[in-house]
Each structure stands twice: as structure tokens, then as C-alpha cells.
Image (cartoon, rainbow, N blue to C red):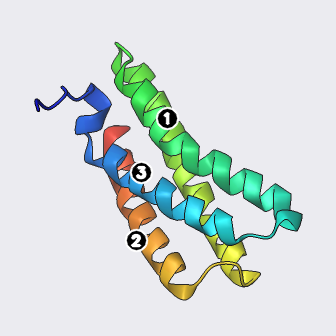
Amino acid sequence: MTERPLLDHENLDAYRVAVEFLALALAVLDDLPRQRRELRSQLERAAMSIPLNLAEGTGKPSAADRARYYATARGSALECGAALDVCALLGHASAEQLDRGKRMLSRIVAMLTRMCR
């Protein structure tokens, strides 16, 4: 079986870690009670925004356009960090999920900060 060619954004470490974080966020969402729909929606949208904006930004022709999408993804990553804090405060995320998620988000934010320059 031949490997399919990667799309440009799939070559980015930031994208790969963002998808890994999305999987973690979805696991946290599975444990969130339905009554926390605002928190569920916020975390889900922000977690999905990171890889989606990375992918869209990678396809933009100008550096300024790319930087704008990368900055949006960076903002979403920071928002996810706050959402994880709220989940942990409410007892809906384990210490391991919080630690693992924050480590991934820290890597994503650092990479995106460099990409925005």
C-alpha cells in the first residue's frame, strides 16, 4: 500500500500536536455533564479551532494572512487552557488530563508564537 501525500498543514508539528490535543479535549467532553453545555460548547469550538485555523492559514498565499490565522489558532489554544482550568475546578477533568493538556497547549502556543512572526 502506498502512503498518501501529506497536505502542507499535516507536515507541521503544531498541527499534529493540535490534533492530539483535540482528542484529549473530546475525552474531557465525554466526561462533562450535559448541564454544562456552555462549557462543553466553548471547549469543543476552541479545541477544533486550533487545527482548523492552522490548516486554513497554511493555505494562504501571504505571510500576513498566514500569521492572522496562526494568531487565531494561538488564541484558541489559550482559551482551551482556561477551559481546562474551569473543568478541573468543577471536578470534570482529572489531574492527569489537566497536566497532559496544559503541556500540549504550552507546546502549541510556543510553536504558534514563532509562526506568527
Q: Write the residue at 52% across / 54% down.
A: 77
Q: Which quadrant of the view contains residue 17?
A: bottom left
Identify the mark at residue 103; answer none if there is no mark: 2
Question: CB under 8 Å between callouts 3 and 2?
Answer: no
3D distance between C-alphas at marks 3 and 1: 9 Å
Residue shown at the point (68%, 72%) measured from the top left? 31
Q: Amino acid at mark 1?
A: Leu
Mark 1 vs mark 2, foreground winner is: 1
Q: Is residue 88 above or below residue 26?
A: below
Q: Is residue 92 above or below residue 7?
A: below
Determine which residue is flagged by label 3. Answer: 18
Q: Residue 36 got which mark?
A: none
Judge by depth and name the residue closer to the eye, 86 or 19. Answer: 19
Direction from residue 31 to residue 77 in the image, left or right: left
Pair 3/2: label in front:
3
Which residue matches tag 1? Answer: 52
Kind of residue at disc 3: Ala
Q: In the image, what residue type sits under mark 2?
A: Arg
Tell me the distance, in whole angstroms, between the alpha carbons under discs 3 and 2.
12 Å
Horizontal relation, residue 37 to residue 8: left or right: right
Whether residue 83 is visible, yes or no, is no
| Residue located farthest toward the top when viewing the structure as drawn | 61
Q: Residue at x 26, y 48 (%)?
A: 13
Q: Mark 3 packing: few (<14 Cα in 10 Å), some, or many (20+)?
A: many
Check the image and report above or below for 79 versus 81.
above
What percent of the width, then of the height, locates residue 47? 57, 51
